[in-house]
Image (cartoon, rainbow, N blue to C red):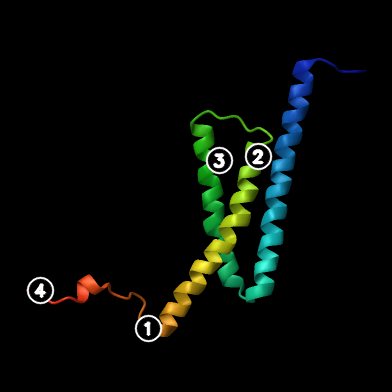
């Protein structure tokens, strides 16, 4: 049996795009998390960064669905890009927090306006 026609081709392309989007997202998560774990040797930091960026991916895909955008080949690249770009940025912010905590010894460094005496 042979299938042909635009509806069949469109359904096959959309099936492939959805499977590839899932595959690319999983591979992006695994590769980025492994590389960052090798660099930092901290499972907690990588785990919490993965959770934060996963929430970002869910929000972006949810907003796309909310506004009625269809998942195309180009929009299928958004979740892996968010993971690959967002995960190192989360690690950077966590490391910056720890370096500031070590430098000052307090979790919340007050701004100069707070320390200014009332006149």
Closer to viewer: mark 1 or mark 3:
1
Up/down of 57 relative to 75, above or below: below
Tell how many labels: 4
* Mark sitting earlier along the chain (2/4): 2
* For residue 43, side relative to residue 18 (left or right): left
Q: Secondary structure at mark 2?
A: helix
- Give the quarter of the image for residue 87: bottom right
Q: Residue at x 72, y 48 (%)?
A: 24
Q: Secondary structure at mark 3?
A: helix
- The Cα–Cα distance between marks 2 and 4, rounded to whole angstroms, is 55 Å
Q: Residue at x 55, y 58 (%)?
A: 51
In this view, the residue in front, 80 or 52, is: 80
Q: Secondary structure at mark 4?
A: loop
Where residue 94 appears, as percent x and y from the top left, is 50, 70
Q: Which residue is mark 1?
A: 104
Q: Which residue is mark 3?
A: 61
Where residue 64 appears, as percent x and y from the top left, is 53, 35
In this view, the residue in front, 1 or 87, is: 87
Q: Which residue is mark 2?
A: 76
- Give the quarter of the image for residue 32: bottom right
- The Cα–Cα distance between marks 4 and 1, rounded to whole angstroms, is 24 Å
Up/down of 4 relative to 114, above or below: above
- The Cα–Cα distance between marks 3 and 2, rounded to whole angstroms, is 9 Å
Q: Which residue is mark 4?
A: 118
* Mark sitting earlier along the chain (2/1): 2
């Amino acid at each position: 049996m042979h299938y042909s026609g635009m509806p069949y081709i469109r359904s096959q392309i959309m099936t492939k795009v959805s499977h590839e989007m899932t595959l690319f997202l999983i591979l992006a998560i695994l590769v980025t998390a492994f590389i960052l774990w090798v660099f930092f040797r901290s499972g907690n930091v990588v785990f919490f960064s993965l959770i934060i960026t996963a929430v970002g991916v869910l929000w972006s895909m949810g907003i796309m669905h909310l506004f009625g955008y269809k998942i195309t080949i180009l929009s299928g690249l958004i979740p892996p890009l968010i993971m690959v770009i967002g995960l190192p940025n989360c690690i950077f912010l966590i490391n910056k927090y720890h370096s500031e905590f070590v430098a000052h010894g307090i979790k919340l460094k007050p701004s100069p306006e707070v320390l200014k005496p009332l006149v």
